[in-house]
Image: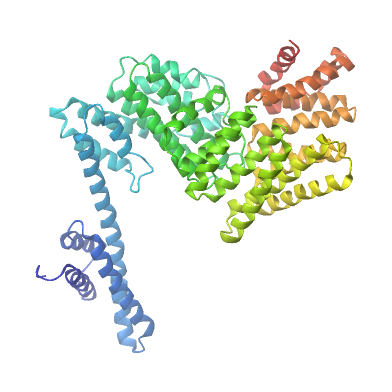
Amino acid sequence: MPDSLPLSDRYLALIDEIVETTLKGKINSVEQVYQLLLKGITSGTGEVFELALSDRLNALQSQVDSEKDELKKAKATRSLRAIKTIQSQWQRFSEQNKATVAIASAVSEITRATADERLAVFIRVTDPNQKYPLNLQQLQQLSKALQQFAQVDSDLEQFSEGITRGLVSWQRLQDNLLSWMYDQKESLGFGGVPGERGPWASWAKQLNSELPQALLRTLAREESAIEFAQRQRGITLRDWVEMALILQYLQRGLINWFDQQAYDVKAGPKLSISTFLTFAVIWSQLASGFRSIAPVYSDACSQIMLQILRTFAQRPYFPFYGGIFASFTGTYLRDALDYLDEPLRRSEGTQEKARILTLLGYSQRALGQYQRSLDFHHQALDIARNAGDRACEIANLNHLSRTYVQQQNYTEAINYSQRALILSRQAGDVYGGQSQRTGEANALVNLGYSEVMQAQELENLEPETYEAAINYLEQGLKLSEKLGDIQSKALCVSSLGIAYLVIGQHQRAIKYLEDGFKTAQVSGDLYLQGRNLAYLAEAYYHLQNSEKTVYTGCLGMYLLEQIASREWRQPAGLLTILQGQIGAEAFQKFLQQHRPKIIAVIGVDGYDHIPQLLEEYQR
């Protein structure tokens, strides 16, 4: 093919030549087509080739569709088949070329960076959020490429060895990634007996490398990752890179598996959410620990944490309305929000940041930190509005309404829920998305709930006021059921239960609160579980059913205290009053009576902790 021809003509001629050779029966495999493309396409000119291929494909498709002559139609059909083979091999060529360019670019950036900047550059070029993220095979190629520069630079040798060791360790862990699940009969998640069971201990046994194994054992014992990092004064770059790759691939491997369990209520999205948050917190704790001994490692840990949150924020199941999830327990939860807060302050206003602030805001509400919750939601609202993230904007209006209810500022609560309702309905008309309809369901619930609470505060006894408010709640429930949105349904039935409790319809309240508890168990929302149980205890107390008051009150108190929510004191106060009325012996008898049912939810340790909590409240 003469080089004097324009590039587009040369590529059309190349395509025609491959088609003709195929029709003559001289091409025996797709590999031959790939080799012809490799030889004929100049690097960096892929777009020109793609246009030429598209022209030929469209022309032949038109001919096949319109040709009446059988012989000509048969030839055109065979030519079209040949073009489609070229198209598949072009995609392979294109992917391979992108990988080659990505590796070359990564090597260039790492080798040109100063020693102090190199780790940050390495974290950036291996970011899974890139348009063309490096896979395992490409990381191995990166390691080999860096090895070529290693003779003159010991840092590059450490990068290369750290990558290789990290990938070898991951291969070993990959085969046993999920084996710990079969030992954990009661629940999936990051709990288990500290040091013995659960994922961390299981993975630690598979590793030979000292640093990653020590970190996993620390996590298995529920000890501080901050203190672990502070002890690593002799850590090498090689060790850090290996540890980083192991942790990152463990997290991605788990999420890939959980994402495939979408129809399993025990696993699926709630465990993916838990995994994202758990690993984000671990990286944040490591960043905190390394700060005093090695700022370069501290910054790299923060960088990885923000990458995880960015990936999480883009997931379709990002929990705009969820509470604190069942697997996210143990010591991680109590400090998680503070650890995530500080690095997010330093990152610029982005759509992802708005979504993470939303999660921090409603989690702070669950902990009883209402002012912090409002601050997060107002900040998220501004960013979401500027980023055009309508679903996030509506979610924050809804959360502001909910938090103002907790502060007993019902006027503001009604105002924000009305704004959420109007915006969700407008957005539903324009975009018609599931998230907007979810926003509408939550707005209806918040509006009804706020109006019930305001009417109660104003001592408004007019039944019409409550009927109108409860009508909003019922509309929200119908919509959440229609959408199949478990999280919103849990909030709807819970709010209806509390509304009926407020107006003194205790039997109806119990029906909805029991449904709310079961639905919150399915969605994995610990806060809503505890809240439903706390209000169930109140309803049973009004009906003078001491036995069920003890059962629901103790369970609710324990669950709320476990997630560090101040609301545990509400059922604790009620139980203390009841104990004074019926006597300690009768109280203990009721507690003992429900021991098997309580243990089924919170285990033996949880059951044994109940009397201690009551003592703490009374002190």
- Please, is residue 226 above or below residue 349 in the view? above
323 sits to left or right of 206? right
Evaluate whether residue 299 shows in this view: yes
11 sits to left or right of 284? left
Evaluate whether residue 264 shows in this view: no
Q: Quadrant of the N terminus?
A: bottom left
Q: Nearer the viewer, residue 619 or 39?
A: 619
Residue 569 locus on image (x, y percent): 73, 21
Q: Quadrant of the C terminus?
A: top right
The image quarter containing residue 364 is top right
- Please, is residue 583 above or below residue 388 in the view? above
- Please, is residue 434 above or below residue 173 in the view? below
Residue 37 locus on image (x, y percent): 20, 62
586 sits to left or right of 356? right
Residue 418 locus on image (x, y percent): 68, 48
Q: Specify the farthest residue to the bottom.
A: 69
For the point 55% across and 32% down, the residue is 182
- Please, is residue 246 above or below residue 577 in the view? below
Residue 586 locus on image (x, y percent): 87, 16
290 sits to left or right of 8? right
The image quarter containing residue 330 is top right
| Colour scheme shown | rainbow
